[in-house]
Amino acid sequence: MASIGGRVVPGDVCSEILLWLPAKEALRGRSICRAFDVSSHDRTFFLWQSRRARDDSGLFLRRHDGRFEMVFTDACAGMPPESLQFLKGGNKRILGSHGGIVIFDTMPAGDPSSTSGFCLYNPVQGELRHIPRPDGASILSVRTFGVAILFADDDAGDHVHRYDVVCMTPTSEWSSNMVCWLYSSKEEAWMLIGDNIYVGPRNIKFHSPVVSSHGRVIYLASDCGRYQKQEPYIVAVDIDTGTSKILPLTEKVLATDGTSGDLEQIEIAAGECGALSVVHCNSASEFTVWEVKDPDMSWVWEQRGRVSMAAMGLQPRPVHGVSLVNGDVLVFTVNEDVYVHSLKDEVGQVKVIKGQEGCCPYMCAYANTFRPCEDR
């Protein structure tokens, strides 16, 4: 039992309150009363909090060499300073992040393609798990290597924690095919999903895969360069069958942005309630945000917003990287500055984070959860 504002609150209610909070806020809640502290220490709580508080709360902004900066879009979320220092130390390279688990490798000095294996890390818990690298996997850069985690426990019991790690990379430079491996936390082994999966004629942005909320499908966006006549598209990869499907963007998505060229960008991100978010940035630094309802079935496109740097009161300049957090927070980088704008705010409201070390074009979302790395 707990006493809050003079009212007695049952222990199970205390736990339920904490389950919906980002990990940083839940940790602060422990100091309110003993009941909050007791209810938030067991493994059952860790698992259910990671299933309830699943919204992303920030982004890893990665550079070409794998180093990164961290930007939080939720003021209630955060990362212990010692965990952030750990991730920045050594030759660590952030490969991906999903559900509160960060995946990184450690590069021997001077050899970006050689690593001994991967590490799964929960920054909140300080929990670390080592897994081997799949045979034949070569990681030249974060641009040409994608990692995603598929969780199989979201509808399971209190103590069940299963997940699969998926790795993807092109078969060669400028290839229209990719190789895909899957690591099972249950089997503790890698298996080859496909060594010649078609991803279309364009370069694929492996650095920002999006996991479908309706099944074991991973989405990847193509680039927008003028070297190819085919319009930009999205690739849907079925992990169970090792097959792919090219999903063209609708004409209204391409038409609304008017201009095209090498400065144009398309990025995808996880949206609200299982939707797929698509942000299109044209060469005039204008952003159009779309939401794809029921992406695994009917592909219904709905425009969520349209905003430009000029409308934000900013001088239009080339955008190096762009992403969305939870479908409604736009984050983009220009040179060494990071800009954060909520589509729910007035157009002129934009947060500017100055002085990041170098341009950070490759972004991946971070969820502030207690999700364990170990499979027990």
Image: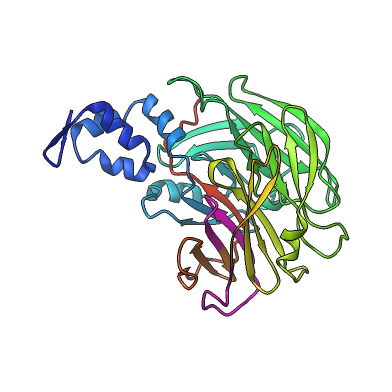
- How was the colour assigned to the protein in this rendering? rainbow
Residue 194 occupies quadrant:
top right
Q: Nearer the viewer, residue 340 or 298?
A: 298
* Residue name at image x 43 percent, y 21 percent: 158
Image x and y of residue 228, in percent: 87, 60
* Residue name at image x 74 percent, y 70 percent: 258
Image x and y of residue 59, in percent: 52, 53
Q: Is residue 316 magenta?
A: yes
Image x and y of residue 160, in percent: 49, 20
**Quadrant of image for the N terminus:** top left
Q: Nearer the viewer, residue 363 or 11?
A: 11
Q: In the displayed orientation, state which residue is furthest to the left.
A: 6
Chain part drawn in magenta: 307-331
* Residue name at image x 36 percent, y 35 percent: 19
Residue 227 occupies quadrant:
bottom right
Image vertical order of residue 344 relative to residue 326, above or below: below
